[in-house]
């Protein structure tokens, strides 16, 4: 990348000011002064401004995975089960943003952007997570109403949600919190066993045509659009 971009991305100053620093002879690459704005630098070069090292800006990666059943959403599993890490690129160390159960399928975001993860998973974030739920027994209109208003899980009421029937034994549920096994436990509270659970959206980000087990790199802008 060009020296000017490198400096600006690393937060040294505005692009205009970085140009001035280069043409003014204040910038060195591997201890040689560079005045040419076309100078290319790579992360292995040592760039200094007025003798102070300027580290390369971290490149964040955002991946959207359609998680299959039978994978855990941790980086390692003490029981030797398959992890979602085996399904995504491993040239950068990625971390799952939140969790999906072993048997849950669907949209999982992975990234190396810790700030993004914190913002999405923080209880106050209220990012909507949309699930399609299949149950062992019929879902009644009263069940839908209760899911929307809140049900008791671990002696704490769930926050208001949006729910609608998609079929006799299928519903869509949008929740804005992320308690452990929340969807399954909300249905259990109504006496309904969940037989299949799929997350189809996180905020405005949807699975789209992504097949089970496949991933897609998304842009920072797309990732941040859900917050
Ligand atoms: N709620 C659940 O019960 N399980 C999931 O995997 C995600 C949400």
Image: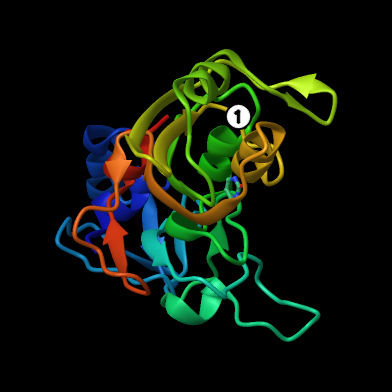
Residue appearing at x 25%, y 51% in the figure? 4
The residue nearer to you, when weighing 25 against 44, is 44
Residue 131, given in percent of the width and then of the height, sits at 44, 42
Residue appearing at x 44%, y 21% in the figure? 141
User: For the N terminus, which image quadrant?
Assistant: bottom left
User: For the C terminus, which image quadrant?
Assistant: top left
Image quadrant where residue 12 sits: top left
Q: Is residue 190 left or right of residue 137?
A: right
Residue at mark 1: 177
Residue 28, given in percent of the width and then of the height, sits at 39, 62
Residue appearing at x 35%, y 49% in the figure? 7
Q: Is residue 42 left or right of residue 152?
A: left
Extreme left residue here?
38
The residue nearer to you, when weighing 52 against 69, is 69
Q: Compared to 155, does 27 lie above or below?
A: below
- Inspect this view and state whether residue 168 appears: yes
Q: Compared to 137, does 142 lie above or below?
A: above
């Amino acid at each position: 990348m060009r020296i000017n971009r490198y400096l600006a991305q690393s937060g040294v100053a505005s692009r205009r000011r970085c140009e001035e620093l280069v043409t003014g002879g204040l910038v060195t690459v591997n201890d040689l002064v560079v005045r040419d704005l076309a100078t290319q630098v790579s992360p292995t070069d040592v760039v200094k401004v007025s003798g102070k090292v300027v580290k390369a800006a971290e490149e964040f990666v955002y991946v959207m995975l359609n998680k299959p059943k039978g994978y855990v959403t941790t980086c390692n599993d003490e029981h030797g089960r398959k992890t979602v890490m085996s399904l995504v690129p491993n040239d950068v160390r990625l971390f799952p943003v939140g969790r999906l159960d072993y048997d849950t399928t669907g949209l999982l975001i992975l990234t190396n952007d810790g700030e993004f993860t914190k913002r999405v998973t923080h209880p106050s974030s209220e990012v909507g997570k949309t699930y399609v739920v299949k149950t062992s027994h019929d879902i009644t209109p009263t069940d839908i109403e209760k899911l929307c208003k809140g049900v008791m899980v671990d002696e704490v009421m769930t926050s208001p949600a949006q729910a609608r029937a998609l079929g006799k034994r299928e519903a869509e549920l949008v929740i804005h919190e992320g308690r452990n096994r929340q969807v399954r436990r909300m249905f259990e509270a109504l006496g309904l066993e969940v037989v299949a659970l799929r997350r189809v959206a996180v905020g405005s980000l949807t699975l789209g045509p992504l097949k089970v087990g496949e991933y897609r790199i998304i842009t920072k802008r797309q990732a941040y659009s859900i917050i």
